[in-house]
Image (tube, grey):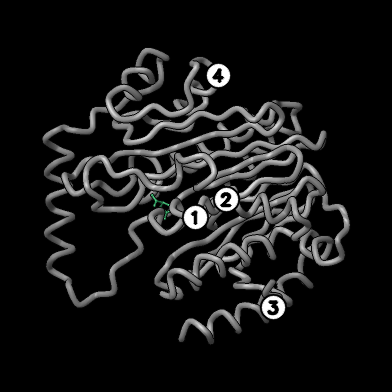
Amino acid sequence: MTRRKFLNHAALGALTASALTAGRSAEANGEKGEMPLIVSTWPFGKAANEAALKILLQGGALLDAVEQGIWVTESAGDASVGLSGSPNAAGVVQLDACIMNGSDHKAGSVAGLEGIRHPISAARRVMEKTRHVLLVGEGARMFALEEGLESVELNSRERYDQWQKQRAAQRAKPAEKKPANHDTIALLVLGADGNLAGGCSTSGLGGKLPGRVGDSPIIGSGLYVDNEVGAAGATGLGENVMRYCASFLIVEFMRQGMLPHEACSQVIRRIMRSEPKGAKLSINFVALDKRGRYGAAGTDEGFQYSVTTPTSSLVLPNPGLGPSDR
Ligand code: ASP
C-alpha cells in the first residue's frame, strides 16, 4: 500500500473506529470522556494499562499506576522493552526510560542503562530522589544499584553466545522481511481527580551504536505531560521524533484547542513537510487531554494503541491522519 493510500484509508478507518468506542465518540463530540483513563502504545500496552487501572481503582497514586503498569511490559519478555529487548551493535541491551508528573511538572529519565530490570523505577527515583532529570550510562546504573533496584548480569558468556547465535540466524535469512526491531511502551494516565502522569520504557533501536539515545527518555520528545492540558507519548524511530520535540508539540496543539487525534496528526504532517519519507518515517503517537478525550496517529500501518477505562479495555487500530489539515 502506498503512503497516500494508507493515510487516506486510515482516515476512513478513524471514522469507523470512532463510531465503535465510547471514548472516541466522546472525543468526536467534544464531550468529557470516562475517567480514570489510561492510553498506551501497542497491544502490549493493554496489560500494562489494566495493571495501572487496578492500582488506581484501589486508591493508589498516579505515579504508582504509571510505574507498575510499565513493569508489566518490562517483564513480559518483549523484544523491544526491558532486558529482553534488542541489543545494540555491541550485543548489549541498553535501556531508556522516563516518567513525568503533571501536577508538579517534575520528571526523571535514565538512558543507556544496562542490567537493571525496571528502568522506569530508576527514572522515577531520579525524579523523586535527586536534583536532576536525566542520568545516563554507568552513572544511571550506579544510582539504580544504590537505590536497591533489581539488577541482572548482562555481559555473561551465556548471553553473549545467545546473541551471536541470534545474529548468525538473522544473517542467514537476508531475503526475509526484517522484523521491527524497536518499540516503546509510552503510557499516559488521567486520574479521576483530573491529574495526569506518564512514562516510557524501551530498549531503543536494535543494533544502535553503543551509547545511542532515542526520543523515549527525552522529556518533550518521547513523552510530555502538562496538567493544564494533557499528555502525549511516542513510539517509532526516535531520530525522527526527537528533532521535532514531538510530544511537547502535540500537547501545545491540544492547548490551542485541537483534539488529541488532530494534534497527533498535525505533528506528523509538520514532520512530513521536512521529511517527505511517508511511512518510512516510523513515527507514531498517543495522546489524551484533561477532559478524558484521547487519540493516536502514526505512519506505521501496523501501529496500534491500547485504551483502558473502568468499563472497557481495547486495542485500537492506527487511525492514520485525520481529514483536517490546518
Ligand atoms: N522510540 C524508540 C527509540 O527510537 C523506539 C521505538 O519506539 O520504536 O529508541
**Label 3 neighbourhood size at 10 Å, few (<14), some (14-19), many (20+)?**
some
Please give the label number shown on residue 244: 1
**Label 1 neighbourhood size at 10 Å, few (<14), some (14-19), many (20+)?**
some
Instruction: Identify the amino acid type marked 1.
Output: Tyr
- Counting residues from the N terminus, which is met first, the one under dot 1 or under dot 3? 1
Does 172 appear above or below 188? below
Instruction: Identify the amino acid type marked 4.
Output: Glu
Q: How far apart are marks 2 and 3 (CA)?
A: 21 Å
Please give the label number shown on residue 323: 3
Q: In this view, does 202 lie to the left or right of 26?
A: left
Q: How far apart are marks 1 and 3 (CA)?
A: 22 Å
Q: Nearer the viewer, residue 129 or 312?
A: 129
Does 27 appear above or below 94? below
Q: What element carries label 4?
A: helix
Mark 2 sits on what residue?
A: 247
Instruction: Identify the amino acid type marked 2.
Output: Ser
Q: What element carries label 2?
A: helix
Mark 1 residue's CB less than 8 Å from ligand 1: no
Does 25 appear above or below 177? above
Q: What element carries label 1?
A: loop
Instruction: Name the residue located 65 percent from the left edge and 36 percent from the top edge.
Output: 197
Q: Is residue 310 left or right of residue 54?
A: right
Q: Nearer the viewer, residue 13 or 164?
A: 13
Instruction: Name the residue located 17 percent from the left edge and 33 percent from the top edge.
Output: 155
**Label 2 neighbourhood size at 10 Å, few (<14), some (14-19), many (20+)?**
many
